[in-house]
Amino acid sequence: MRIELPKAVERFGSVRFGELQRVFELDSGLANGANASREQPIRQVPYEELSEIHKRTAIVVPIKGERLKLVEGVLCGIPHPCLIIMVSNSPTRPVDRFHLEADVLRDFCTFTGKHALLVHQKDPILTTAFEQAGYKEILNRQGRIRDGKAEGMLIGTLLASLAGKDYVGFVDADNYFPGAVEEYIREYAAGFAISRSDYSMVRIAWHSKPKIVESKLFFRKWGRTSSRTNEFLNRLISHYTGFDTEVIKTGNAGEHALTMELANTIGYSAGYSIEPNHLIDLLERFGGVIEPPAKSRIKDQVEVYQIESRNPHLHEAGDQEHIREMSYQALSVVYHSRICPPKLKTELRREAVTRGFIEKGTEPTKPHYFPSLNGIDRDRFRASIESTPYGRMAEEEAESRHRVS
Ligand code: GDD
Ligand code: MG
């Protein structure tokens, strides 16, 4: 891949936000013995380097009742060396969708000679494992694992960490273009190849989202939800730096990846607020405005890369209510940040009233938060899942890594 370095960065305490980066070639060929210079403004990340990073990467696919044809396409777009972890919250009645997903994944693994982990979010063994390992925040009042994409992502991240992976990336299961999935995962690796910190995050900004407008295809760049979320986050940053900024372009980026060190260190929030909360959490934890929790002190800087993909993004369209809910969750997570200044809070409240999210005189609902995964008792968690196929496979992956290194 040939990719530009961020032309400018915004520094906020120990966090470095890179400006949006453009991709010049999806495949820039082999290294052919050439040593890429870190100083060049446009970097060739050779095929071998991407592939080495992919070997150390787990790709988590959260899924809830998606069409199986789409899932097949997504699996086919994941580069072979990556470990696939599918976390499903699909219904098992009246039709057992999870069973069908298992079938698709099994066929895929047979034909490609791959291994993949598959787990259901409501698996009772998994529930007990979280309970035993002291991570009760993921459980609901009935003592089962909560619904939600973020919850699925947390499960996937923990399994990736137990499998000994150094990077974890996410792709949605409802993408129509396998080529776009492949591109995102290459871009994750290119971001990590460029990064200089063990605490890095790569976020994808879609090139465009095709829509039919007046019987013609229109390639729309920014949706309302993402442009508003980006604006709130930028306003939060500029309040502290004293300079207006537009650096954040990926506030809602569902397609993103983290180094395992960072994934284990940061805190999370529920449902679709997880993506904007990644950025809020970095600002709170490493921004130097408020005292960070003891366990999250790090020597390195945190690096955030934002890469503009080349493929258009086409996925199952959510209805208006779903999109409104996503906007509301993003607004709430900024509103409830411990570093959100009173003036921004007032504006967010006003916006929430205008858009009909809340009644006048009330506050946006506080999101549900999850502590960092560093606090989990991993030995207990591992012991609880060792009898399951996914527990055994995570163990085997971790062992094979030891054999290689
Ligand atoms: N495991 C699990 N559990 N997966 C879930 C759940 C759940 O409770 N709910 C949804 N998913 C899966 C879906 O099947 C899909 O693969 C993925 O999570 C994203 O969910 P969608 O419902 O398709 O989200 P979206 O398309 O509206 O929004 C996507 O893009 C946004 C940016 O525009 C998501 O990736 C958002 O997180 C992102 O902010
Ligand atoms: Mg979707």
Image (cartoon, helix red, strand yellow):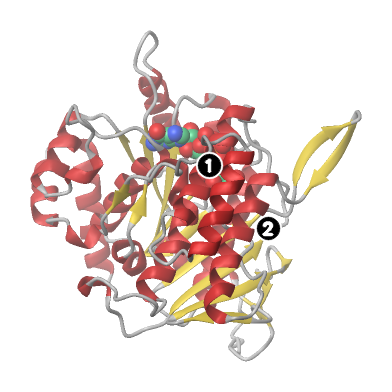
Q: Residue 328's mark?
A: 1
Provide residue 213's location: percent of width, then percent of height: 86, 33
Is mark 1 in CB contact (under 8 Å) with mark 2? no
The Cα–Cα distance between marks 1 and 2, rounded to whole angstroms, is: 26 Å
Provide residue 315's location: percent of width, then percent of height: 64, 36
Q: Earlier in the sequence, mark 1 or mark 2?
A: 2
159 left or right of 281 in image: left
**Front residue (pair 244, 398):** 244
**Front residue (pair 54, 274):** 274
Label 1, residues with CA under 10 Å away: few <14, some 14-19, many ≥20:
many
Label 2, residues with CA under 10 Å away: few <14, some 14-19, many ≥20:
many
- How many marks are shown on the rendered structure? 2
Q: Secondary structure at mark 1?
A: helix
40 left or right of 211 in image: left
Classify 313 as above or below 339. Answer: above
Q: Is residue 252 visible?
A: no
What kind of residue is marked 1?
Tyr
Report the quarter where the N terminus lies: bottom right
Provide residue 60's location: percent of width, then percent of height: 41, 47
Q: Is residue 240 visible?
A: yes
**Residue at position x 51%, y 48% from top?**
330
Classify 199 as above or below 182. Answer: below
Q: Is mark 2 within 8 Å of ligand 1?
A: no
Label 2 sits on residue: 309
**Front residue (pair 74, 253):** 253
**Residue at position x 73%, y 56% from top?**
310
Q: Residue 35's mark?
A: none
What kind of residue is marked 2?
Ser
Report the quarter where the C terminus lies: bottom left
**Residue at position x 22%, y 51% from top?**
396
332 left or right of 175 in image: left
Outermost residue on the top side: it is: 94
